[in-house]
Image: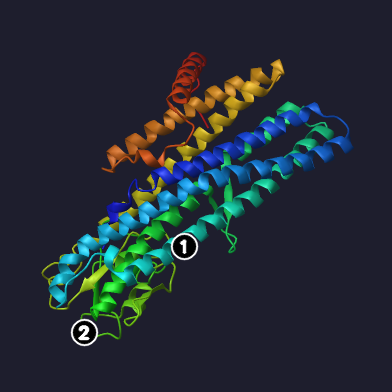
Amino acid sequence: MLRPDYFYGKTDKLVEMYQDLENWIISDIATRLIKSGELSGTADRELWKLQQMGLHNTEIVKRISEMSGKSRNEVRRLLRDSVMTSFSDDKEVLTQISSSDIISPLKNNMAILAMNAELIKTYGELDNLTKTTINQTQKDLLNMLNEVDYRVASGMQSYSSAVCEVLDRYAESGVMVEYPTGTKRSLEAAVRCCIVTSMNQTAAQVTNIYIAQNKIEYVLVSAHPGARYDKKNPTGIPSHDHWQGKAYKIIGSEPGFPNLLESTGYTIDSKTGKGTVVNLLGLHGYNCRHSHGPWRKDMVNKYLDKNGNVNINADESQKLYDLQQKQRFFEREIRKTKREIMTKKQELNMIAETDVKEILQPQYDKLAYKLRMQNKRLQSFCKNNDLQLQGDRTKVSGFNKKQSAIANGRATAYKNKIEKNGTTKVE
C-alpha cells in the first residue's frame, strides 16, 4: 500500500504544465481583449470577435498538442512509480501469505494489463479536461468581449478601464473546469485531483491482482492523522477516519472483520482482481490518500492499540483535518493573488492611456502587498499549528524570481505609503 505522505509533491511537474497552459490562456485572452479596442464599427467588431475566437482556439489546440507528449510521459512515470512503491510495501506480507514466489509487477502479465488499463483511463480523463478547457475558454473570451462592449456602449467606462476590470475578475477565478454534475474546479485543482486519484487507484488495481492470484480473503486499510470526516455522517463512508486502520473481509464478513464494500465503499472481485470504487467519497475515491494491502487475519495490525482500537485520537485527527483544510484555503488565496499580479502586470505593459496607467500601478502595488501579507499569514498559521509548509501548493507557473522581486519591491512601496497615510487595511 502507499503511505499517505507519498503523494506530497508528486504532481508538481504535471501541474506546472497545466499552469503554463492556464497562464497562456489568460494572457492570450488579455491580449485579444486589449487589442480589440483599436477597432471601431459594429460589423467590424462582430467579425473580429469570430476571428479572435477561431485564432484563440487554433493556438490553444496547438499548445495542448505540444504539451500532450510531455504530460503523457510524466503520467506514465507517476503511475509506474506508485505501483512499484506500493508493491515494495506489500511484498513482505505477500511473501508471508503466499506459498509461491512473488514476482515484480513489471513481470506479471495481469499486473501489466491492469497498469495499461489505468494509464489509458487517466489519459482519457486528462483529454476530457483539456477539451472542456478549450470549450470553456471560447465561451469566456466571447462573454468578456461582449461585456466590455456593453460597458463601453452604455457609457459606464472607457474601453481600457472596462477591459482591466473584466480581466481582473477572470484572473481572480482562473480557468475553471465544469463537470457534468455542475461542479466547478480550477484547472490545476482538477489536474491534481485526477493524478492523485489515478496514482492511488492504479497501485490499488495491481495490489488486487496479487490478492486474486494468491486467493487472499482479507485486506488492511491504511490510517493517518487528519483523515477526511463528515460532521453530518460521522460513521458513514464519507468519514474516512471511521473506517481507516482496520482489516476487512473482501467477501462477506465475520466478527472483527466487517465487509470491505459495506464499510469503505470499495470492492474487489476475488476472481479477476478488479477493484471498483462504488462510492466516490470512500476508499480510493476522489483525492483519497488511503490505500489497502493484502492481509491475513492472524497478523498483528500496527494501526490498532492493545484494546483493538485505531491508535489515532479521533478528536485530534478531526482538528488536524480542519486545520489542513484552512491551510489549503490560504494556499489557494496565494495562487489566486499571484495570477492577479501577473495579469495586472500585463495590463500595465499593454494599456497605452496614461490616466488608466495611473490607476493600474496602485492596484498592482496593493496586490503585491496583499501577497506579502498572505504569505506571512500562511507561514504564521503553519508555525502556530505545527503544520508543514508545502511550497508546491503556492507555486504558480510563470511567477518566477523576477516577478517575485518586482512584486516585493512594489509591496514595500505600498507599505511605506499606507504607513505614511496612517492606513493598514488591505482587502
Give the colouring mode of the picture. rainbow
In the image: residue 68, left or right of residue 219: right
Tag nearer the camera, 1 or 2: 1
Q: Is residue 21 above or below residue 209?
A: above
Q: Which one is earlier in the sequence, the residue at label 1 or at label 2?
A: 1
Q: Is residue 210 above or below residue 152?
A: below
Badge 2 marks a residue whose secondary structure is loop
Where is residue 135 drawn, in percent x and y?
Answer: 66, 52
In the image: residue 180, left or right of residue 400: right
Residue for badge 1: 120
Is the residue marked by circle 2 packed among few (<14), some (14-19), or many (20+) residues within 10 Å? few
| Viewer can see residue 71 | yes
Where is residue 30 drawn, in percent x and y?
Answer: 66, 33
Question: How far is the residue under mark 1 from the one under mark 2?
Answer: 40 Å
Residue for badge 2: 255
Residue kind at label 2, given as amino acid type: Pro
The answer to which of 53 and 247 lies nearer the viewer is 53
Seen at 52% across and 15% down, the residue is 421
